[in-house]
Amino acid sequence: MTKTDPKLYLALDNCFAKKRWTSPNEWVKLIHDLGVYYVEASSDNEFDPLYGDPAYLADWLSEMKEACTKWGVHVANFYSGHGSYTTLGLAHTDIRIRDRMLNDWLKPMALLSAQAGAGLGFYCHAYSNAVLQNGQAYMETEQDLYRRLAELAVYCKACGVRTPGVEQMYSPNQIPWTIDGAEKLLREVYRMSSSSPFYLTLDTGHQSGQRRYMRPSASIIREAAGRVRQGERLRDFWLGPETASNLFAELVKSPIEQEVDILTQMDDEMNKFPQLFADYKDGDTYLWLEKLARYSPIIHLQQTNGTSSAHQPFTEEYNSSGVIFGDQVLQAISKSYQDSSVEGMPPVCDEIYLTLEIFAGTSEMNSDIKHKILESVKYWRKYIPQDGIRLSEALRLITLA
């Protein structure tokens, strides 16, 4: 049964509490009072190993465990924060930084996760534009990233962290950002790590950018060139490699008889960089869930209107224009578990932490932050009324409602 019917838990990322409720005693009690008993602890909330003294981190972990015991709360997963997200990190152009991110950040985080009995999720890499624009450099960087993730997977297995995983993103410089690319990453890391489990975090708002990066047809390029000739500045017009963009600038200025030749050259250049383009399907949240939820022990929940990843709450205001609905999320997860296993992929997950990841603005009032999270919890408790519920039971309750 567990292969097709995972347990579901409602969790809350404590990123909303950073720079406000910063000690474990504070945020554990607050999350308990908001009606959530499973937590994703963000390293931004004062336990980042790059600046946290080892003795401090040991005290922090002890305080967290005591607070969780007192309030009946479980820290299910540790997660990287915004600080590491904003860097090239694990895909840095300098090997010294890549080594430091792996050995001085990710491995200490894995060890902390193991000591807390928690899983580990993260995103701490990006490709520079110079790498994106060089096919050989892209391939080498991709393979180096896979090797490092595989090394981390082996380390996590040895530590006892069952479900390490990387988050999916939505632009070419942050892989995995397409469905096919996510499957490739999981398969390659699993192979390179000698079958040490490694997983994916799906985010319900991280499908908002892919369709900006779809490959344009020749007719679309012709039409765009005509608009530029009339003085229009194009927005969100993606041609992939800069060589194709340079040819487009030439197309705009060239006589009509040269159009076919230039378009052919542009097509040749774009053919060299398939990794810079998404398909229409990659912008579909529910298709991502159908394809990959069974390899996603963490699914980040945010409301979105489909055009941005602003980590909005599930309040009446945002739900009215939102595209993320609890019943459809669960149905998509169910479809994923009904699919046949794919060769070379990690074991299917038996537990999924549906984790609210609601951001708080710097100037936002504390009372407003609490309100929007409380409303979001109320919304999702309609679909996950008790933690550990099997997916089949959650779906049955929806049909009875």
Image: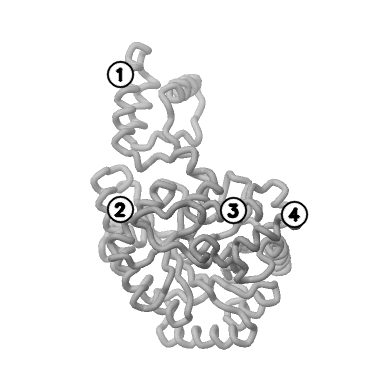
Q: Residues within 10 Å of mark 1 (few under 14, many from 20)?
A: few
Callout 1 amino acid: Asp
Q: Are marks 2 and 4 in contact (CB under 8 Å)?
A: no
Element on which disc 2 rests: helix
334 w.r.t. 67: above or below: above
Seen from the viewer's position, the closer of residues 298 and 94 is: 298
State how far apart marks 2 and 4 are (Cα): 42 Å
Specify the farthest residue to the front: 1
Query: Which x, y percent locates residue 357?
Result: 58, 62
Q: Say which of marks 3 and 2 sits in front.
A: 2
Q: In the image, which disc is placed on residue 316?
A: 4
To which residue does mark 3 refer?
Answer: 310
Callout 3 amino acid: Ala
Q: Earlier in the sequence, mark 4 or mark 3?
A: 3
Q: Are marks 4 and 1 in contact (CB under 8 Å)?
A: no
Element on which disc 3 rests: loop
Seen from the viewer's position, the closer of residues 115 and 135 is: 115
Q: Is residue 399 visible?
A: yes
Q: In the image, which disc is placed on residue 261?
A: 1
Q: Earlier in the sequence, mark 3 or mark 1?
A: 1
Q: Earlier in the sequence, mark 4 or mark 1?
A: 1
Q: Residues within 10 Å of mark 2 (few under 14, many from 20)?
A: some
To which residue does mark 2 refer?
Answer: 142
Q: Say which of marks 4 and 3 sits in front.
A: 4
